[in-house]
Structures are given as C-alpha cells and as structure tokens.
Image (cartoon, rainbow, N blue to C red):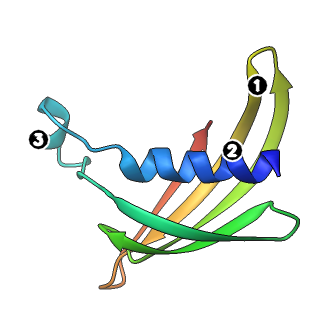
Amino acid sequence: MKRSIYALAVCAALLGTGVTGARAAESSCVPVGGEALGQFYNDTKDVVAAMSGTWAAARGTVLSQKQTPTGLSLEMEHVFSTSDGGVVRTRDQA
C-alpha cells in the first residue's frame, strides 16, 4: 500500500507541475497539467491511468526502490500519450 501511495504521489507531482517563466520559452519545455485516475497492477509495480488535461493516458513503472533515512526513494519510468498519438517518456527519481 505504501508503494502505491508513493507511485500515485509521483504521478500527481509530475502532472500537477506547470512550466513557467524562462523555461517555458525553451523549445524542449512544454507546460503540462491535468488529473489522472490510476489503476495499479503487477503487485503495485505498474500503474495505468486515463487522464484529462494535457495528456490522454499514462503508464508508470517502478524500476527500483530503496529505503532512505527520510522515506522511500523510487526510480520510475513514465510514458504519457496525447490524444493525437504523441508520446513522451520520462525516467525520474521520487
């Protein structure tokens, strides 16, 4: 359950963060936002979500995790898709 909460928090953090200021002017940066309703599977290692906002759907996978003095550190991979067939892949630490 704890792993599920952290994975969901990572997805929410990624989706709820907007890009503003000078970074938005960079060609590689795109403002994103929206909400996701995730469904966990594979013993809570993977999550898929239908989404509203910038993305149409997403998939997240916990690649590794380790306990730290301040909590749990996750290495994750995400694949976000748009309604017109575009795909963005990320690899992140949470």
Measure the C-alpha gap from mark 2 to mark 3: 31 Å
Q: Is residue 49 above or below residue 69?
A: below
Instruction: Please state which amino acid type lies under the numbered disc 1.
Output: Gly
Label 1: how many residues lie within 10 Å, few (<14), some (14-19) or many (20+)? few
The part of the image, by quadrant, that contains residue 75 is: top right
Q: In the image, is 54 to the left or to the right of 74?
A: left
Q: Earlier in the sequence, mark 1 or mark 2?
A: 2
The percent coordinates of residue 78 (x first, y second) are 57, 59
At horizontal 33% and vertical 83% (from top left) the residue drawn is 83
Q: Is residue 53 above or below residue 30?
A: below
On the image, numbered disc 1 is attached to which residue? 71
Q: In the image, is 52 to the left or to the right of 67?
A: left
The percent coordinates of residue 22 (x first, y second) are 13, 31
The percent coordinates of residue 65 (x first, y second) are 81, 39
Task: Please state which of residues 82 and 1 is positioned toward the viewer in this rendering.
Answer: 1
Mark sitting on residue 6: 2
The percent coordinates of residue 66 (x first, y second) are 84, 32
Callout in the foreground (2, 3): 2
